[in-house]
Amino acid sequence: MDGDTSELGQHSILAGRTIVLGVTGGIAAYKAVELCRRLVDLGAHVIPVLTADATRFVGEATFSALASERVRTSLFDDADPIPHTRLGQSADLVIVAPATAKLLGKYASGISDDLLTATLLATRSPVLVAPAMHAEMWEHAAVRENVATLRRRGVNIVEPDLGRLAGGDVGAGRLAEPERIVAAAASVLGGSTRRELVGVRVLVTAGGTREPIDPVRFIGNRSSGKMGHALAVVAAARGASTILVTTQRQAPAPGVEVVAVDTAEEMADAVLGRYADVDVVVMAAAVADFRPKLPAVEKLKKREGIPEIVLEPTPDILAALGERKRGQILVGFAAETERVREHAAEKLAAKQVDLMVANDVSAPDAGFEVDTNRAVLLDSSGALEELPLLTKVDLAGAVWDRVAGLLKRGSS
């Protein structure tokens, strides 16, 4: 994550901002002292929140002396009966540095058993997490999955550095230096001032539909819903009133209304029924093209032989939206395996789409079930933009940048 590296630029962004600084119990907690000082020097109002384990490494008195307010450590030993809610509501940004594997696991799982984790769950403000741990822990599959989950939910991650670790080992997992975390904070807050979607009503679809063969089996696809969920998270962060119609049973992001569906028919009903009340629809879902015409009422048994499954087309939701457009912005996705641009351009024209996001889903780093994507943006004016490999959250930002431009053009 790149931020404004100049002290003047960082001061202009951070001055007057309230930052909750969470510190957890890792050996790198000592670096949080310097981070606190830098944030205060740049004009931020810093409220330190230390876990019980953090106090084994750093003293409360040190942070209370350097920060803008005294250290908070407990949900219960406070004059305020609901300190986590007050902290979460007052913060412009919550930073956790260092963030241990324990903190990442609890945050990703929605567990709040102390003041810091309760504050993280109680805030709708941006969150910036700087992990630090031994290399083996950082590379563990569970930790990587927790980090990926947090990214999908819109949490900003400052990747740890490669360097000397506790015990004299060398590897990935060293807490990023305070100046890099400060730059990331300025980048997050600088970006969070972008509220160009305030007053805009958007609907996003996500996930692959499931078309039943019988009560147990279905026709589906490999879509994880990550792209659609990222689009909803970023839209809400930029101020949009956001509806997410999804087949994935993931925890909703703050400010996002979730409508759960399974089949293409259910998704069509949910989207078309709300179409007249929104300004933008982004069809990021992977809707099945076909479904069994007569799903079996009971589970099909192998002993009864190979069944004949007659398929019929599912509703073409994107085409129906194009036909019913009354000034809305319509964004489609084209998941292709060959001739990506050609197929996407044909789909854009045939379905009256304003912006098409096309990607090669056969690519291992930019298809289904991964956290990155590489896309080509095509619009109805003929403009084409090829984007580099991005996280799906960053690609969502690029899509909303284009949508904001289309909205501005339509209102001028």
Image (cartoon, rainbow, N blue to C red):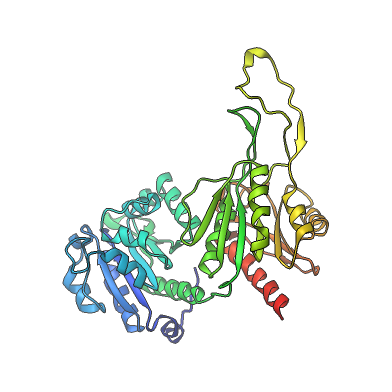
Residue lying at the far top of the rendered structure: 303
Q: Nearer the viewer, residue 252 or 16?
A: 252
At x 19% / y 73%, what residue is drawn? Answer: 62
Report which quarter residue 217 is drawn in: top right
Report which quarter residue 321 is drawn in: bottom right
Whether residue 303 sits left or right of residue 32 in the image: it is right
Q: Nearer the viewer, residue 245 or 12?
A: 245
Q: How many marks?
A: 0
Residue 319 image offset from top left, x and y in percent:
77, 53
Q: Is residue 208 visible?
A: yes
Residue 52 image offset from top left, x and y in percent:
20, 58
Residue 403 image offset from top left, x and y in percent:
66, 69
At x 35% / y 84%, what residue is drawn? Answer: 43
Q: Is residue 368 above or below residue 280?
A: above
Q: Nearer the viewer, residue 191 or 31?
A: 191
Report which quarter residue 304 is drawn in: top right
Whether residue 58 sits left or right of residue 280 in the image: it is left
At x 25% / y 57%, what residue is drawn? Answer: 114
Whether residue 49 sits left or right of residue 356 in the image: it is left
Q: Is residue 55 above or below residue 8?
A: above
At x 25% / y 77%, what residue is drawn? Answer: 67
Residue 32 image offset from top left, x and y in percent:
29, 69
Q: Is residue 284 visible?
A: no
Q: Is residue 231 above or below residue 15?
A: above
Location of the C terminus by quadrant is: bottom right
